[in-house]
Image (spheres, rainbow, N blue to C red):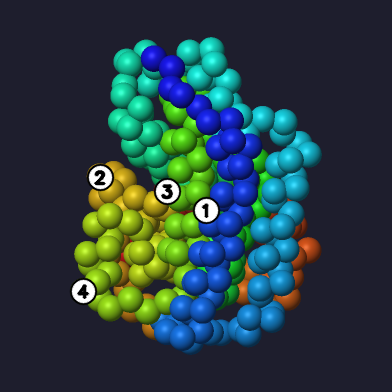
Amino acid sequence: MRYNISASMVLSQKTIRFAAFLAVFAAMALWESAMPRRRRSFPRTARWPNNLGIAAINPLIEFYLLSVTPVGLALLASARGWGLTRAVSLPWTAAVVLTVVALDMVIYLQHVMFHAVPLLWRVHRMHHTDLDFDVTTGLRFHPVEILLSLVIKLGAVAALGPPVTGVIAFEVALNTTSMFNHANVHIPERVDRLLRLLVVTPDMHRVHHSVLAPETNSNFGFNLPWWDRLFGTYRAQPRAGHEAMTIGLGQFREPVELRLDRMLWQPLRGGVGDYPIGHEETT
C-alpha cells in the first residue's frame, strides 16, 4: 500500500521543525526562569553559548556530510513500495502511529547501546558532562553521535517504509520533547506522576543525569516512558532527591570543560570510568 504524500509537506518539514524548536525552546526558557526545579550551579552565560554552539554545528555537519535524511528516505520508500508498513497494508493513520512508536523504541535502544559500548560512551558522554540540567542540555550532543544516530534512523526508516508524515511527526517530537524533558522546570508531583504515564518528564529524565552510575544507566527514554518500564531500566527518583542530586559525571567537572572546544575533544580524553553498562558499581 502506498500513502499519499504532500510535496509541500516534505519541502516544508525543516520549517516545521525549526518553528517547533523556537517555540518550545522559548517556552521552556521562560518556564525555567519563572518556576525552576533546581538552583543553577553556573550562570547561563557560562553554558548556553557553548551548548547552543553545538546545536548550531550539528545541522551543518548533517547537511554537508550526508545527502539523505529520514524524511527523504521515507519519500523514496513510498515511491518504491519498500518497508514493513507497506508489506502488511496498514491504514495510513495506523502506519503513522506505528512509525512514531517504532522509531521511538529504536532511539531508546540506541541510547542504551551508547551507554553499553565503551567507545560509543566516549562520544555520548559529552551530553552528560553538562554541570547543570536545563533546556540547552537537550541540545548538547556530540556531532559524531548525531551522525551515528542519523545512520541508525535511516536504517529503521528503510526497514519500516513509513509514511512521510509519521517521520516528520517523530522528528518534531524527538526535538521538542528532548528540550522539555531536560528543562529545569517545576511540575507538581501529582501532575508529574500522571504525565510520565504518557511522556518522559523532566523529573523522570533528570535521574539519568545523576553523577551516580547506576542512576546514569536508567531512564533512557526520550519521548515515550514505556520502554524503561518494559525493559527494566526505570528508576522513579534519584537517591539524593532532585534538589540535592549532583548533575554530571565524576570526570570533566572543572568549569573550563563547559567550553565548546573542550566539549568537542572529550571523546579523546580520559578513561570511561564506571559508567558504561556492566562497569558501574551497583547500589
**Residue in view at x 38 percent, y 21 percent:** 85
Q: CA distance from mark 3 to mark 2?
A: 19 Å
Number of the label disc, if any, that sits on residue 175? 1
User: Three-letter amino acid code at disc 2?
Assistant: Leu
Q: What residue does disc 2 label?
A: 230
Q: Which numbered disc flags the more N-terminal residue, 2 or 1? A: 1
Name the mark on residue 190.
Answer: 4
Name the N-terminal-most of marks 3 and 2. Answer: 2
Whether 231 is drawn above or below 162: the answer is below
- 3D distance between C-alphas at marks 4 and 1: 26 Å
Residue at position x 36%, y 64% in the image: 201
Q: Is residue 206 visible?
A: yes
| Label 4 – label 2 distance at C-alpha | 22 Å
Residue neighbourhood size for the residue with mark 4, other residues' Cα within 10 Å, grouped as few (<14), some (14–19), many (≥20):
few
Of label 3 and label 4, which has the lower sequence position?
A: 4
- Contact (Cβ within 8 Å) of mark 1 with mark 3: no
Q: Position of residue 283 (x, y in %)?
A: 32, 64
Assess whether mark 2 and mark 4 are in contact (beta carbons under 8 angstroms).
no
Residue 95 percent coordinates (x, y): 35, 29
Residue type indicated by callout 1: Asn
Give the mark toward the camera: 1 or 3.
1
